[in-house]
Amino acid sequence: MLCLGIESTAHTFGCGIVSFDGKILANAKDSFTSASGGMIPSEVAKHHEQAKEKVLQDALTKAKISIKDISLISYSAAPGLAPCLLVGLKFAQKLAKEHKLPLVGVNHSVSHLAIGDLVCGAKDPIYLYVSGPNTQVVGFAGGRYRVFGETLDVGLGNMLDKFAREVGLGFPGGPKIEQLATGKYVELPYSVKGMDVSFAGMLTKALKLFKQGIAKEDLCFSLQETAFSMLAEVAERALAHTDKKELLLIGGVAANKRLGEMLRIMCNERGATFHAVPLEYSGDQGVMIAWQGVLQAGEKLSPETADIRPYERIDEVNVTWR
Ligand code: AMP
Ligand code: MG
């Protein structure tokens, strides 16, 4: 049995195909990028409209199957940019009607956790979830995913993207900042409150220093060192308080080597196991949506009742599969 997953919450339109026993057959995607600006939801939705048929065909070709071999369609119902979510929903509804297939609408954030568990073999980790809009320290406790700590303002990826945009590096900014992080340290606000973090002050200060002529290389290096140290601190605090023995790094910013290095050192020092989701599955893609669909295969929707939930949080999801 195979599940097709459709991802469309933000910059990426993706189609993934997985078997019900967790074999990944295809991961096809097309991501919106921009040389100078950021993400305008209506423009990104237009990108997804234009990309969807080709991405689906790519996935089917990679998996060497036809749509007739699919048993279930899963789409990202939450959370995300409404115009983008709607493109995925409508595409999923159309395919479900045409091929008489059941639909499942899943939470994108939860699916980042689930694909991490699947590909890394993690059992019961603390998750450090760092994507564009999200920065959360999450763990499973008492039947739900609990958010132990999170950003009090902007998400880590969005902070990096915003800095990059303002200094002319384009979108996405995280990878550019990583490449340019070769300078020396300048002090930026280090802001940890319990297990919560805040990045807005650091961003404001870095932009101010940029206008004063401090080199991009120094600022990129300092943003990474400061923000990642804050995350290592709160991740360690969550491990200590929950007595969990594994840390799993997930979300688009998990691609960053320096972040992985810092967290690995912290885990080694306290005898915990560190997992980072491989690059292919760290950013947004359809595979995680497909796998989450398999986990929630019992929660089928008809195309008429399928909907989107742009603001649903990870701790609001009713976890039926763990
Ligand atoms: P997601 O929303 O999970 O797809 O993650 C996208 C975010 O990850 C964007 O904000 C990117 O700038 C960020 N990102 C991707 N690669 C890197 C990297 N190597 N270093 C830092 N941030 C990154
Ligand atoms: Mg994401």
Image (cartoon, grey):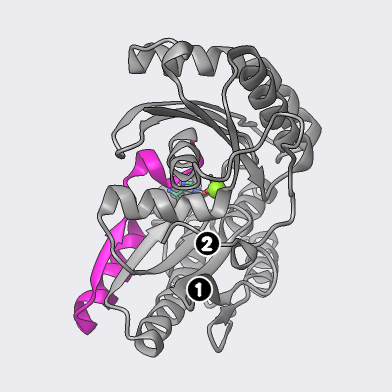
Q: Amino acid at mark 1?
A: Val
- Closer to the camera in the image, 229 or 41: 41
Q: Which residue is mark 2?
A: 319
Query: Magenta stretch containing residue 262, yes or no?
Result: yes
Q: How many marks?
A: 2
Q: Is residue 171 above or below residue 160?
A: above
Q: Is residue 319 visible?
A: yes
Residue at 45% from the left image edge and 42% from the top image edge: 288
What are the residue bounds of the magenta stretch?
A: 257-285
Q: Residue at x 39, y 56 (%)?
A: 182
Give percent across and percent down for residue 172.
Answer: 57, 41
Q: Is residue 170 left or right of residue 321?
A: right
Q: Nearer the viewer, residue 16 or 173?
A: 16
Instruction: Identify the image quadrant of the C terminus.
Output: bottom left
**Amino acid at pointer 2:** Val
Mark linked to residue 186: 1
Counting from the top left corner in percent of width and height, residue 186 is at 50, 73
Residue 316 is drawn in which quadrant? bottom right
318 inside magenta stretch: no
Which residue occupies 62% across, 18% down? 95
The location of residue 236, given as percent across then percent down, is: 37, 81
Front residue of 165/209: it is 165
Which residue lies at the image location 67% right of the left edge and 53% below the top edge?
A: 162
First in sequence, mark 1 or 2: give its number. 1
Q: Main secondary structure of the magenta part?
A: helix
Estimate how packed mark 2 is, as few (under 14), some (14 to 19) or many (20 or more) residues with alpha carbons within 10 Å. Answer: some
Discs 1/2, front: 2
